[in-house]
Amino acid sequence: MKEIKHFINGEYVESASGKLFDNVNPANGQVIAKIHEAGEAEVDAAVKAARAALKGPWGRMTVAERTEILHRVAAGISARFDEFLEAECLDTGKPKSLASHIDIPRGAANFSVFADLVKNVPTEAFEMATPDGTGALNYGVRRPKGVIGVISPWNLPLLLMTWKVGPALACGNTVVVKPSEETPTTTALLGEVMNAAGVPAGVYNVVHGFGGNSAGAFLTAHPDVDAYTFTGETGTGETIMRAAAKGVRQVSLELGGKNAGIVFADCDLDKAIEGTLRSAFANCGQVCLGTERVYVERSIFDEFVARLKAGAEALVIGPPDDASSNFGPLVSLKHREKVLSYYQQAVDDGATVVTGGGVPEMPAHLAGGAWVQPTIWTGLADNSVVVTEEIFGPCCHIRPFDREEEAIELANSLPYGLASAIWTENASRAHRVAGQIEAGIVWVNSWFLRDLRTAFGGSKQSGIGREGGVHSLEFYTELKNICVKL
Ligand code: NAD
């Protein structure tokens, strides 16, 4: 059976403890590989390698040399596109049609975009008067922050990991990555690409394992990591923030959401239906930016519900290799248990199940997979946990509203503030409402349209900090002021 090993100081290594755990294909429940679980020794070795590389050739390279290497990393991912695609789809179960146009190309782009970006960012300079009349000159320089701990989730494994590693390396840092225990393969495979591209040993390190009392906790407890960047659940973010407080290490947290879509009667209904279908059901609903609460103006409520139901029922459920399928399984049976508990709760809370609500019947060879039906509810109270908690499954609740202010109030009513989508053809309303939504990103008449130069992150309990474009530099560099007395 294939084994997935740590990648430390440019080499694949096994766990000294010999501890292995299963990597399961969520489409059929079969074990596809054994993953080495890191103990404190492997995490320490990875951090030491990263520290040494910072002081070694990587730290001495010019920006031009470093970014040229990162372009080779991007090209290396593209050259091995099919291998990355296969690995990502085996780990996650997601349709190849989806991963081939989002996960893998964006994984490569995260290196080339940030390699280009760091070359063109100015800093500041201030001339200052001094009492003796000679004056002083202040100027800013950016320096790498150091060794960055990267902890990533399972929903978009390569994309969300490289979204952090790309800018971290472009800024001259070194990294120790702890991918999700559910989806380690592409993060491990990237080590080969790094070596082939000429990334010096120790710049990119990977340790596998779980969160608490495993690789994740060992990494966040390690005193020689300078900062942590994390994507995952809000509760995990709190735990990581507590660990990072020891030694006053900085954190960048991209956390959970319970995102609202607002559909006004003056929208283009075709666009609103298409966009809401994607935002509720793409990647089997496992997108942090996805819409789980839909507020629809009352005059078009019935038509919207009927058309969204038709769209959900037209989704083609199937395994990654099935070219006609656009709806895969959840990431694991454990996650399905959680999603199904909300499906049950919705019924207990008196929801009308418009469609779905259970497990689809699958052919025998897929019956062991984590399949679940796309699900739509109406009729729940605003305080039902189904409407207030992140489910992270292919489901949404639709509720009517009468006034614009009411829709804004509903959208803003939860402690999360990650993303929102507004559907209206009235430009004044679009700007007026978008400005009032408490979220890090608001789409008007679209969803998941991402320009990597723009700020990305959550407000309220959906995160701390912004990454993307020059904002990534705020986190991945130290801005130092040099004051020269003339
Ligand atoms: P998770 O928080 O369970 O796990 C994320 C990572 O943290 C994994 O690698 C896990 O092993 C690790 N981890 C868990 N406990 C830890 C601990 N105590 N110490 C150190 N590391 C620990 O999240 P998940 O289930 O993998 O991902 C789904 C969640 O991620 C959802 O809440 C989703 O909204 C969120 N998410 C947010 C964004 C965003 O950009 N805001 C993007 C994608 C996913």
Image (cartoon, rainbow, N blue to C red):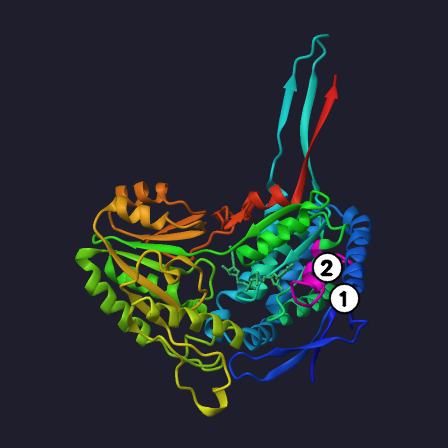
Among all residues in the image, which is located at the extreme bottom? 364
In the orientation shown, which residue stands out farthest toward the left? 299
Give percent across and percent down for residue 425: 25, 50
Q: Is mark 2 within 8 Å of ligand 1?
A: no
Q: Please, which residue is most extreme toward the front here?
A: 348
Residue 189 appears in which quarter of the rendering? bottom right
Where residue 311 appears, x then y in whole percent? Answer: 30, 71
Q: Nearer the viewer, residue 252 or 113?
A: 252
Quadrant in which residue 475 is drawn? top right
| Dot label at residue 39 | 1
Is 143 left or right of 287, judged from the image as shown? right
Q: Which residue is mark 2?
A: 218
Residue 332 visible in this rendered orientation of the protein:
no
Q: Is residue 311 left or right of residue 14?
A: left
For the N terminus, the image quarter is bottom right
The local crowd at label 2, few if under 14, some if 14 to 19, many if 20 or more residues have their Cα within 10 Å, is many
The residue located at (59%, 64%) in the rendering is 158
* Circle nearer the N terminus (2, 1): 1
The residue range painted magenta reads 197-220
Q: Residues within 10 Å of mark 1 (few under 14, many from 20)?
A: many
Q: CA distance from mark 2 to mark 1?
A: 8 Å
- The image's mark for residue 335 is none
Amino acid at pointer 2: Phe
Task: Inspect the magenta stretch and tell me whether residue 211 lies in it.
Answer: yes
Instruction: Say which amino acid is labelled 1.
Output: Gly
Secondary structure found at label 2: helix
Q: Is residue 29 above or below residue 430?
A: below
Image coords of residue 130 (percent x, y): 69, 12
Kindly check if marks 2 and 1 are in contact, taking CB atoms under 8 A apart as contact.
yes
Above or below 28: residue 188: above
Indicate the quadrant of ligand 1 in the picture.
bottom right
77, 39: nearer the viewer? 39
